[in-house]
């Protein structure tokens, strides 16, 4: 719990996009992301495309950004708009998405 008046200094920003598609279209969406190099085009610090076998039809895209401004630049990018249209054309009306932007306030990681 933060003390009152404490300032959060963002280490970086994590965006989480959850796509809900027809289970029989998951492979098509994964192929689209790979073929079109969507994650690479975003220029995030790191990005991942994840599926949850326990939730057929759910695809999660995570991306780490240096700051919120880098994520905003991607969200406003004309290339992202092209990808969105391509994805919508691919999966049709059986599609929904939820996006979240999270700010990292504390982190630990093991050195490898």
Image (cartoon, rainbow, N blue to C red):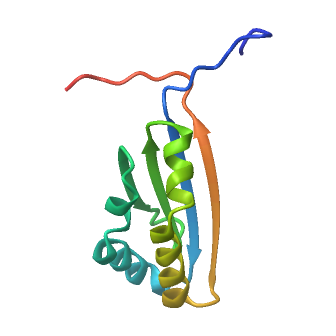
x, y percent for residue 48: 38, 55
Residue 34 lies in what quarter of the image?
bottom left
Q: In the image, 42: left or right of 84?
A: left
Residue 32, compared with residue 100, is above or below; it is below
x, y percent for residue 78: 50, 70
Residue 40 lies in what quarter of the image?
bottom left
Nearest the camera: 6 or 111?
Answer: 6
- Does residue 23 appear in this view? no
Total residue callouts: 0
Residue name at image x 33 percent, y 78 percent: 31
- Does residue 40 appear in this view? yes
x, y percent for residue 100: 63, 51
Check the image and name the residue furthest to the right: 4
Residue name at image x 52 percent, y 90 percent: 89
Check the image and name the residue furthest to the left: 112
x, y percent for residue 90: 48, 88
Residue 101, compared with residue 93, is above or below; it is above
Nearest the camera: 50 or 69?
Answer: 69
């Amino acid at each position: 719990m933060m003390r009152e008046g404490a300032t959060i200094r963002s280490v970086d920003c994590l965006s989480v996009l959850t796509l809900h598609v027809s289970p029989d279209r998951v492979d098509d969406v994964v192929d689209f992301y790979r073929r079109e190099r969507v994650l690479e085009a975003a220029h995030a610090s790191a990005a991942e495309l994840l599926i949850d076998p326990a939730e057929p039809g759910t695809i999660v895209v995570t991306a780490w950004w240096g700051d919120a401004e880098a994520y905003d630049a991607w969200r406003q990018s004309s290339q992202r708009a092209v990808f969105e249209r391509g994805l919508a054309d691919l999966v049709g009306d059986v599609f929904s998405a939820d996006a979240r932007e999270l700010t990292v306030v504390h982190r630990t990681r093991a050195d490898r």
